[in-house]
Image: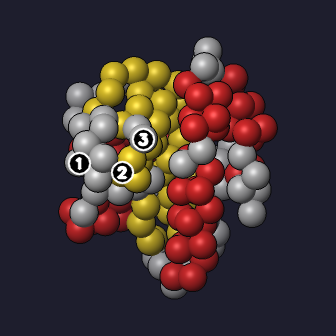
Amino acid sequence: MRIQELISPRRVTHSLEVASKKRLLEKLSVLLGRDEPEVNAQGAFQALIERERLGSTAIGEGVALPHGRVKGLKKAVGAFATLEHEMDFDAVDHKPVTMVFALLVPEEATDEHLRILAELAGVFSQKQVRRELAQAKNAEDLYQRLTRATGV
């Protein structure tokens, strides 16, 4: 899968300012709905918050991958944000989060869901990729760097 199949330039934001994890998930839910008429921000938020209640989706090294399943969704949809300020996300390595890739998948897409998450975790575990993304100047630059740096 190519990252462009999951995101669009309108679903990438740079230096997002939020004060809490809940507010972050709300903002990501709105982003997920851009360019995707099937995605309702409230439904997206419910899916993300329900999954987050089961345990943190932070994978370490400053990255979180909040995700959820949504009834009626036809394909996987993603959004990516860098944060203006580090945020505690209860990561296993206790490091605060600065990059967040949110993912929604169709309710019945269990195997696809796990495959995409594994691929994303592999990409974001690479120090060079994180470094490249951290150097972005704006949302457009971030999108270009993300699509160039990832083989997902």
> Which residue shows up at 40% across the image and 53% down it?
59
Mark 1 Cα-neighbour bin, 10 Å: few <14, some 14–19, many ≥20: some
Q: Secondary structure at mark 1?
A: loop
Q: Amino acid at mark 1?
A: Asp
Q: Nearer the viewer, residue 14 or 152?
A: 152
Q: Which residue does the numbered mark 2 point to in the structure image?
A: 58
Identify whether 125 is placed above or below 98: below
> Which residue shows up at 35% across the image and 64% down it?
47
Q: Amino acid at mark 2?
A: Ala
Q: Which residue does the numbered mark 1 point to in the structure image?
A: 90
Q: Are marks 3 and 2 in contact (CB under 8 Å)?
A: no
Q: Which residue does the numbered mark 3 point to in the structure image?
A: 61
Q: Is residue 149 left or right of residue 74?
A: right
For the residues carrying marks 3 and 2, which lies nearer the camera in this image? 3
Q: Is residue 22 left or right of residue 136?
A: left
Q: Along the polypeptide, which appears first: circle 1 or circle 2?
A: 2
| Res. 10 image quadrant | top right
Identify whether 22 is placed above or below 116: above
| Res. 112 image quadrant | bottom right
> Which residue shows up at 44% across the image and 71% down it?
69
Q: Which mark is residue 124?
A: none
